[in-house]
Image (tube, rainbow, N blue to C red):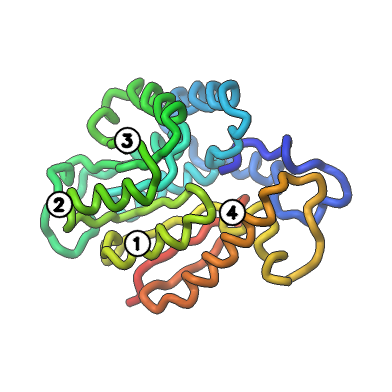
Amino acid sequence: MGYNYNNIIDVFPGNIDNRLRTKEEEYTNNYSTPFPPEVAKVLETLIDETIHEFEEHYYMTTETERKLLFQLIKIFRCSHVLEIGTFTGVATIAMASALSSCSSLSSSGENNGDNSSSRGKVITLEMDPKAMSIAQKHAKKLKYLNDRIDFVLGPAMESLVRITKEQPNKQYDLIFIDANKDGYTSYFDFIMDNHLLSDNGLIIADNALYYGQVHRQAGYDDIKLFNSRPDIPGHAKNIHEFNQHVLKDKRVQVVILPLFDGISIITKSK
């Protein structure tokens, strides 16, 4: 989420204490290693089309977050990635372009329920056909991604149930959650209850601090966002409840980082 928040977060004194700092985001973009040129070019045209086609273009992950996902997949040599919430695919393309040719992190040593282990694959879930169509169109521009992304259209939970039934033993090395905020807890529970996360895998949940409002939902201060979207407080409450839920789950360990809109990094307890 969050390519450009300037149309939502007004710059005036009442918002100084909100934590979305667009200039710091610009700096981190400029001083982080760029994507490979061919990937950067595709992402640039995709971002331009998304801004033109969607009022909600701020759903896109920020460039720094995409670079973090790219780095994590490289560092942990991930082969199997699940994305819950494609939108127009900026994170999808970034992650797929990072996929390792190495074996999955799954401790089973098997092919993890499919035949894609040799090259890796992103399975990405999206319910908006227009957004998915744009994602597919731009992903096709990078021919080496053609067999690295499976696009699944439909409500996320229905898609999760279906793909799990189709490949009941499949586990994922990285799972990126960036969909409807009121569904985060259900997605997390389904992932853990159905053993979708590999033993050394990561769950990355976006928007963990949602517009600087999650800590306010938790009572840490009473400064409110001025002239904000009316749905922000409700989504912030959903995210706070998700953060509480994950922290209480003894199956996992979690750290929340203040990367722009906040991310949670969740791993299995050891």
Q: Nearer the viewer, residue 40 or 117?
A: 117
Of circles 1 and 2, which is in front? 1
**In x, y percent, where is residue 166?**
18, 48
Q: Which residue is mark 1?
A: 190
Sequence order check, earlier mark of 4 and 2: 2
Say left or right for 190 vs 21.
left
Badge 4: how crowded within 10 Å, few (<14), some, or many (20+)?
A: many
Verify CB contact (< 8 Å) between mark 4 and mark 2: no
Asked if disc 1 and disc 2 are in contact, CB closer than 8 Å, the reply is no
Provide the residue designation for mark 2.
Answer: 113
Q: Quadrant of residue 190?
A: bottom left
Task: Using the numbered discs, state the Cα–Cα distance from disc 4 to disc 2 in whole angstroms.
Answer: 34 Å
| Marks 2 and 3 in Cβ contact (< 8 Å) | no
Of the residues shown, which amino acid type is indicated by label 3?
Phe
Callout in the foreground (3, 1): 1
User: How many other residues sit within 10 Å of disc 2, few (<14), some (14-19) or many (≥20)?
Assistant: few
